[in-house]
Image (cartoon, rainbow, N blue to C red):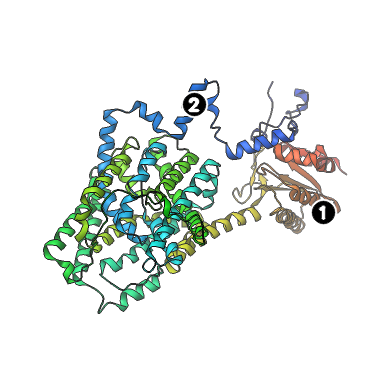
């Protein structure tokens, strides 16, 4: 026995129980009618919705059928993944992690000193932030490739936001305390999002907006380094490009230092050349990784033997020696700075999360392993909470270091531990040697590091694919470059939400026609050869129908109908008697949507046009039944496939006189 089911019927949700009539081959192909899903009580429906929203990956599945001790071990492994991969750790993996860890350490030390300047903090705080947080992440993180530490964008962001509240020169102690407070609340925010399984909230910042924001932040960071590369002593504290360029050109005759320019530009050229070599041939990935530390050593030696600091070359001068001191007592838990620290921490925490999760997922996809976003958030949050109590500021996954870590062949997070140990030795032994390190070389290192954040290829692709996404990208980019980092971030979020609202409030609809020789009905704009059915208008709604778009959907359907009536009248085609609404893409409907369909039904009745529904999903048909709209429309006017509905309409038209 062969049952004829159209492609629309085959695409219908399996949860709908269809009404199967008795089959007689002499009557033609078997036609299935839309059935109704089994009724669920409120508790079951609420539980299913909650599980799908927060536990869609079913994290408790692995615990089923396990003994109590096994469940405890698995739970411990869930919180501390090191318990799992540590049991299979061997010397071969350690050798790979050791090489990777030493490689990223050579990159991170000069970067940390430079990034701390972006945050308006003393150099040692950058090194502190690459000692404790990586150790916490190594125990709790699930990514094998992320390298933890301060990053350029977050450093600039926290520095900019803190400076708006407290002057880092006049009130240095309060500034540092507010930085630790912001770091604490950044960690709380990250851990809370992960623990409450609200990681999906960071998805509201679209990829296009992130590309624009990162690119704008990279330009801003690079421009800020001009004060070090050119040796300008009195430089604007504003970050917008107009203010920065005014500050640069106003000091061209009396503020620039030629020795500093020689150091900065020559080593910048060297760093960019090293980066080019590493990009050209992946075998030489270590060249751009060790280039920064070599640059620091050479530049420091050059300044020391020539005493260029006597000629106006600005140097680091002093980095406090020793491991991280406790800062728990410095965090504001009372007073007016608590709220300020909270607001700054939330913003920096979310930006840090977005960057780290994106990096982690990228490398997880390359190495083909799963990354739990919520678990990552808990790990990142915990390390920032601990970091805030050990003199660290906000840390996250660094793309440049993670890329080097990956190419160096890291196998586990032990590479972060190796890096942390090297930073510890630096803090205990080597910091006095950085006394004569010129600020110009740090500026050059930062410029070479952030250039890769300007992803013009991604921007070109965004322009080709989605013009609205490109507007979001450019809005975030120009907001950061021409106004400020925080305004650029606000624009990025606002445009991302605006795009969502636009897509929700103005969903797409399509006029469907029949592809000749088939029972398939498709968009006439996409398939010009699709033929319209005389006397019938078929409209597909490509979205859920909610209060925000219900009126628009009704009006757009009526506009399709009016246009087709005018066209039929103009060319002498039969009068439109049926309107079929194809509802396969309508995944949900609320009371406003149901009222909108009722209004559509009443409007069509006045015009003597029959409303037909095609292929409503289980959620939709259940709500239509509960509202009794199915009784008004008539269950005989609800079909499983467009082809069945069209066959019904044409048969009925032929029967009418």
Q: Give the alpha-carbon distance from disc 1 to disc 2, as whole Å.
A: 62 Å
| Among numbered discs 1 and 2, the one appearing first in the sequence | 2
Tell me the residue at 31%/37% (across/down).
410
**Res 646 visible:** no
Dot 1: few (<14), some (14–19), or many (≥20) neighbours within 10 Å? some
Dot 2: few (<14), some (14–19), or many (≥20) neighbours within 10 Å? few
**Res 490 visible:** yes
- Identify residue for label 1: 603
Which residue ends up furthest to the front in the rendered image? 329
- Identify residue for label 2: 72
Query: What quarter of the picture does the N terminus occupy?
Result: top right
Q: Position of residue 121 (x, y in %)?
A: 35, 60
**Helix, strand or loop at mark 1:** helix
Query: What quarter of the picture does the C terminus occupy?
Result: top right
Tell me the residue at 45%/62% (across/down).
161
**Left or right of 554: which side holds 391?**
left
Which residue ends up furthest to the left in the rendered image? 305
- Determine whether 11 is above or below 120 in the image: above
Marks 1, 2: nearer the viewer = 2
Judging depth in this view, the residue of 211 and 441 nearest the camera is 441
**Helix, strand or loop at mark 2:** helix
Which quadrant of the structure image shows residue 447?
A: bottom left
Judging depth in this view, the residue of 427 and 592 nearest the camera is 427
Q: Position of residue 252 (x, y in %)?
A: 27, 77
**Left or right of 285: which side holds 645?**
right
Q: Position of residue 234 (x, y in %)?
A: 31, 74
Q: Position of residue 486 (x, y in %)?
A: 47, 62
Which quadrant of the structure image shows residue 81?
A: top left
Residue 48: assigned label:
none
Which residue ends up furthest to the right in the rendered image? 657
């Amino acid at each position: 026995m062969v049952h004829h089911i159209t492609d629309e019927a085959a695409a219908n949700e399996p949860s709908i129980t269809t009404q199967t009539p008795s089959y007689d081959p002499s009557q033609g192909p078997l036609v299935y009618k839309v059935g109704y899903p089994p009724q669920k009580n409120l508790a079951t429906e609420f539980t299913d919705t909650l599980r799908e929203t927060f536990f869609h990956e079913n994290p408790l599945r692995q615990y089923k059928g396990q003994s109590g001790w096994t469940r405890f071990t698995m739970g411990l492994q869930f919180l501390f993944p090191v318990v799992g991969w540590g049991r299979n750790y061997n010397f071969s993996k350690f050798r790979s992690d050791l090489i990777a860890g030493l490689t990223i350490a050579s990159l991170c030390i000069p970067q940390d000193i430079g990034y701390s300047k972006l945050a308006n903090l003393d150099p040692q705080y950058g090194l502190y932030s690459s000692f404790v947080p990586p150790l916490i992440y190594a125990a709790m993180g699930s990514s094998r490739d992320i390298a933890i530490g301060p990053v350029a964008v977050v450093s600039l962001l926290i520095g900019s936001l803190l400076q708006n509240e407290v002057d880092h020169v006049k009130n240095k102690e309060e500034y540092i305390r507010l930085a630790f407070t912001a770091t604490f609340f950044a960690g709380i925010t990250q851990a809370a999002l992960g623990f409450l399984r609200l990681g999906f909230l960071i998805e509201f910042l679209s990829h296009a907006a992130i590309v624009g924001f990162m690119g704008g932040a990279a330009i801003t960071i690079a421009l800020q380094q001009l004060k070090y590369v050119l040796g300008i002593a009195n430089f604007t504290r504003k970050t917008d490009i107009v203010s920065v360029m005014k500050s640069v050109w106003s000091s061209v005759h009396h503020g620039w230092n030629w020795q500093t320019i020689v150091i900065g530009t020559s080593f910048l050229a060297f760093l960019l050349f090293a980066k080019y070599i590493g990009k050209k041939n992946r075998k030489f990935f270590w060249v751009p990784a060790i280039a920064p530390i070599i640059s620091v050593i050479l530049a420091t030696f050059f300044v020391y033997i020539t005493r260029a600091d006597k000629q106006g070359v600005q140097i680091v001068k002093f980095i406090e020696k020793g491991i991280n001191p406790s800062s728990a007592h410095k965090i504001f838990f009372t007073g007016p700075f608590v709220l300020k620290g909270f607001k700054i921490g939330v913003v920096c925490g979310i930006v840090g999360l977005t960057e780290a999760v994106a990096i982690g997922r990228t490398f997880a996809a390359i190495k083909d392993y799963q990354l739990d976003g919520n678990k990552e958030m808990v790990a990142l949050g915990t390390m920032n909470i601990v970091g805030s109590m050990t003199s660290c500021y906000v840390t996250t996954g660094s793309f440049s270091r993670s890329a080097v870590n990956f190419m160096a062949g890291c196998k586990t997070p032990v590479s972060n531990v190796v890096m942390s140990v090297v930073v510890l030795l630096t803090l205990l032994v080597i910091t006095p040697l950085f006394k004569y390190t010129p600020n110009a070389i740090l500026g050059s290192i930062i410029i070479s590091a952030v250039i890769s954040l300007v992803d013009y290829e991604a921007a070109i692709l965004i322009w080709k694919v989605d013009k609205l996404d490109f507007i979001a990208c450019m809005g975030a980019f120009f907001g950061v470059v021409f106004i400020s980092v925080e305004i650029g971030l606000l624009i990025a979020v606002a445009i991302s939400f605006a795009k969502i609202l636009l897509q929700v409030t103005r969903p797409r609809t399509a006029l469907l026609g029949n592809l000749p020789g088939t029972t398939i009905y498709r968009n006439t704009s996409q398939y010009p050869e699709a033929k319209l059915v005389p006397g019938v208008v078929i409209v597909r709604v490509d979205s859920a129908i909610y209060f925000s778009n219900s009126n628009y959907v009704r009006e757009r359907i009526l506009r399709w109908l009016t246009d087709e009536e005018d066209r039929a009248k103009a060319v002498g085609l039969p009068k439109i008697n049926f309107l079929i609404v194809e509802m396969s893409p309508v995944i949900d409907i609320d009371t406003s949507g149901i009222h909108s369909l009722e209004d559509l039904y009443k409007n069509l009745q006045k015009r003597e046009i029959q409303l037909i529904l095609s292929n409503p999903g289980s959620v939709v048909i259940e709500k239509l039944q509960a509202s009794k709209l199915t009784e008004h429309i008539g269950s005989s006017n609800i079909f499983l496939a467009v082809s069945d509905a069209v066959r019904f309409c044409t048969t009925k038209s032929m029967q009418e006189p």
